[in-house]
């Protein structure tokens, strides 16, 4: 490992305890991954923002770091927190939770983060040139960065991304190197449009967040390393790309996908059988009491589509829509949010759809969503059953 003089000094504690700990974290990862050096980054994205995920230990850890002289050295965004920062009271978030959540936010602000609270950071901030090195936690965003935006990041943990933000560097290993960005396994889409549930007369078409989410989930479970998708078509919507990346990062350790036809690698099939098996594995309810959209948080493109399909309609049950404040602001200016709200939906800004006490406070036994990642965590975090349906099915069946 080649260390610069300044890095050696930081490791010896000359620049304070926080920076020393940050470099120690990076050095430990460098040793584990046989890295020869660190690499400067253009952007850090830190997870571990919801109090539900980091608890009192994380809260205290952040308090101590923010009380030091340390500051983030590069542009840093943070993941969603656990509540709408402005409207938490109206949404019945317990005040004990809110108090701790607000403290976490203030510690991050003190360290110098942008007020992003988003898991789709590429949506509201300008993205550096393809090939740039970044350090993003939040698996769905990291996979999107590598696979769609052509940026270079490993799937950072909350701690390693924090260390990267404090030092302005990350470990030069794995997906930062050309040789590790090649696919080692392929998944071929061999999906036929047909009646897959004849008794329910449901015709499956491979499109939309649900289909791409199921493909990503299956790939995450059955592959490792960089996965190549075949037969997906040359254009996907941002909603489909996001759903694919979100579900791919939910299970397994894959940090990137490609599309192509690499020779000499193992090829697995993803057809109707795999689609249905994956759907049945995650979806365990026929309907849901609460409609949830926005895991990962909704983009402006998705809010536009949602507003179009909700024109003049009313939800017959509660519906919550998760997005960042920045995206909500744009949606308000363009008139999308008022259409969605007129249909009876409630926006929850800056929060994560899964790591929030909101679902428990709404006291629901089951939700309906088009997000495979959301369904996975809904069950694991809240013990809530999920009906996984296509976006159009959700709207047509509930308005
Ligand atoms: Fe985003 Fe939370 Fe889903 S961080 S990807 S809304 S689990």
Image: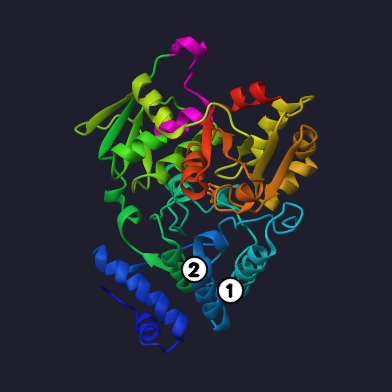
Q: Residue furthest bottom?
A: 14
Q: From the viewer's perspective, is 98 left or right of 121? A: right
Q: Residue at image x 47%, y 27%?
A: 211
Q: Is residue 290 magenta?
A: no
Residue 149 lies, in percent from the top left, at: 48, 45
Can you see residue 124? no
Q: Is residue 218 above or below residue 120?
A: above
Taking the spot 52% from the left edge, 66% from the top edge, the residue there is 55
Task: Indicate left or right for 148 with 362 as reference.
Answer: left
The residue wearing badge 1 is 111
- Cα distance, mark 2 to mark 1? 9 Å
Residues shaded magenta: 193-215
Residue 385 visible, this angle: yes
**In the image, residue 103 lies at what x, y percent?**
63, 71
Tally of numbered tags:
2
Neighbourhood count class around disc 1 (C-alpha, 10 Å): few under 14, some 14–19, many 20 upward:
many
Q: Secondary structure at mark 2?
A: helix
Q: Is 7 in front, or is 337?
A: 337
Residue 174 versus residue 229 in the image, above or below: below
Mark 2: few/some/many CA within 10 Å (<14, 14-19, 20+)? many
Q: Earlier in the sequence, mark 2 or mark 1?
A: 1
Q: Is residue 371 left or right of residue 83?
A: left
Say which residue label 2 marks: 165
């Amino acid at each position: 490992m080649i260390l610069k003089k300044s890095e050696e000094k930081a490791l010896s504690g000359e620049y304070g305890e926080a920076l020393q700990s940050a470099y120690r974290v990076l050095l430990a990862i460098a040793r584990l991954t046989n890295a020869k050096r660190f690499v400067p980054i253009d952007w850090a994205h830190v997870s571990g923002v919801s109090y539900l995920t980091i608890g009192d230990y994380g809260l205290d850890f952040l308090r101590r770091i923010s009380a030091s002289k340390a500051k983030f050295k590069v542009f840093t965004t943070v993941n969603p927190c656990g509540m709408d920062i402005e409207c938490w009271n109206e949404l019945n978030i317990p005040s004990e939770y809110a108090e701790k959540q607000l403290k976490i936010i203030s510690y991050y602000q003190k360290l110098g983060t942008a007020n992003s609270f988003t898991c789709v950071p590429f949506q509201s901030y300008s993205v550096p040139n393809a090939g740039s090195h970044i350090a993003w936690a939040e698996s769905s965003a990291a996979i999107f960065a590598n696979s769609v935006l052509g940026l270079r990041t490993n799937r950072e943990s909350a701690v390693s991304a924090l260390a990267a933000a404090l030092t302005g560097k990350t470990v030069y290993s794995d997906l930062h190197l050309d040789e590790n960005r090649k696919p080692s396994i392929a998944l071929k889409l061999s999906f036929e449009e047909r009646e897959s549930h004849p008794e329910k007369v449901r015709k499956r078409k491979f499109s939309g967040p649900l289909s791409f989410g199921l493909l990503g989930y299956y790939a995450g479970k059955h592959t490792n390393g960089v996965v190549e998708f075949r037969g997906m078509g040359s254009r996907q919507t941002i909603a489909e790309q996001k759903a694919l990346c979100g579900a791919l990062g939910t299970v397994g350790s894959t940090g990137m996908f490609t599309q192509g036809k690499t020779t000499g690698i193992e090829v697995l099939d993803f057809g109707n059988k795999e689609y249905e098996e994956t759907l049945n594995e995650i979806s365990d309810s026929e309907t849901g009491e609460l409609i949830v959209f926005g895991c990962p948080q909704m983009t402006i493109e998705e809010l536009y589509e949602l507003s179009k399909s909700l024109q003049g309609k009313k939800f017959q049950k509660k519906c919550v829509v998760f997005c960042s404040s920045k995206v909500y602001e744009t949606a308000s200016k363009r008139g999308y949010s008022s259409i969605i709200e007129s249909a009876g939906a409630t926006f929850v800004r800056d929060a994560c759809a899964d790591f929030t006490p909101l679902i428990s406070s709404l006291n629901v036994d089951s939700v309906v969503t088009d997000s495979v990642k959301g369904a996975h965590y809904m069950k694991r975090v809240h013990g809530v059953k999920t009906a996984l349906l296509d976006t159009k099915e959700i709207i047509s069946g509930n308005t």
